[in-house]
Image (tube, rainbow, N blue to C red):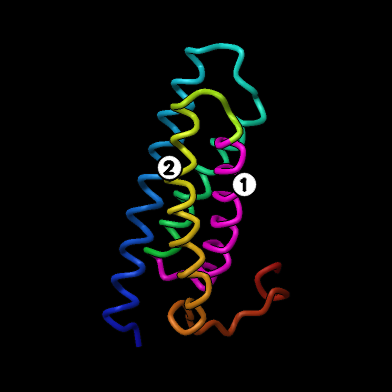
Amino acid sequence: MVTETMLAKMENCKQVCIECQTTCIETLNYCKTQGNIDMTLMCMMRDCAEMCMMCVNMIMDGSEFAGRTCELCAEMCVRTALACELHRDEKIKAVAAICRQCAENCQTIAQQSAAYFRRPNSLTIAEVAV
């Protein structure tokens, strides 16, 4: 049974993931206009944005993989934040704050997800592969 507290945490996580995804995409577009921006950093922001959206989709679907998806999203957000904090451009540095907020929310969902994201599934991998 999903408690009101957990529903609020999931909703908050979804909203922060959406904000992080939007910020990363907007900053990517900004970087494209600046020239001479590290492609590795741009790829990290793109990957972070994609993972944030996947996290939202998994939570909304109640996927049994939502917890692990949130855990990976948190890791990617922390790494993106670290890379952005090292950059000299203030707009890129600003991405770090939302990435850290997203990581914190995703880590909370990852830690508490086992009881909330389970679907009965009697299929085995061998049956799916057929």
Q: Which residue is mark 2?
A: 21
- What residue lies at 44% left-to-right and 20% top-to-bottom? 30
Residue 103 in picture, x, y percent from top left? 50, 56
Tally of numbered discs: 2
Q: Amino acid at mark 2?
A: Gln
Q: Is residue 108 above or below residue 55?
A: below
- What residue lies at 48% left-to-right and 47% top-to-bottom? 99
2 or 1: mark nearer the eye:
1
Asked if residue 124 lies left or right of residue 52, the reply is right
Magenta span: 61-85
Taking depth in this image into account, of 115 and 99 the one nearest to the observer is 99
Q: Is residue 125 above or below residue 75?
A: below
Marks 2 and 1, how far apart in space?
A: 15 Å
Residue 55 in picture, x, y percent from top left? 47, 57
- What residue lies at 73% left-to-right and 75% top-to-bottom? 126
Mark 1 element type: helix
Q: Main secondary structure of the magenta part?
A: helix
Asked if residue 15 lies left or right of residue 82, the reply is left
Q: Which mark is residue 79?
A: 1
- What residue lies at 70% left-to-right and 67% top-to-bottom? 129
Asked if residue 30 lies left or right of residue 121, the reply is left
Q: Is residue 9 above or below residue 92?
A: below
* Residue 69 part of the magenta segment: yes
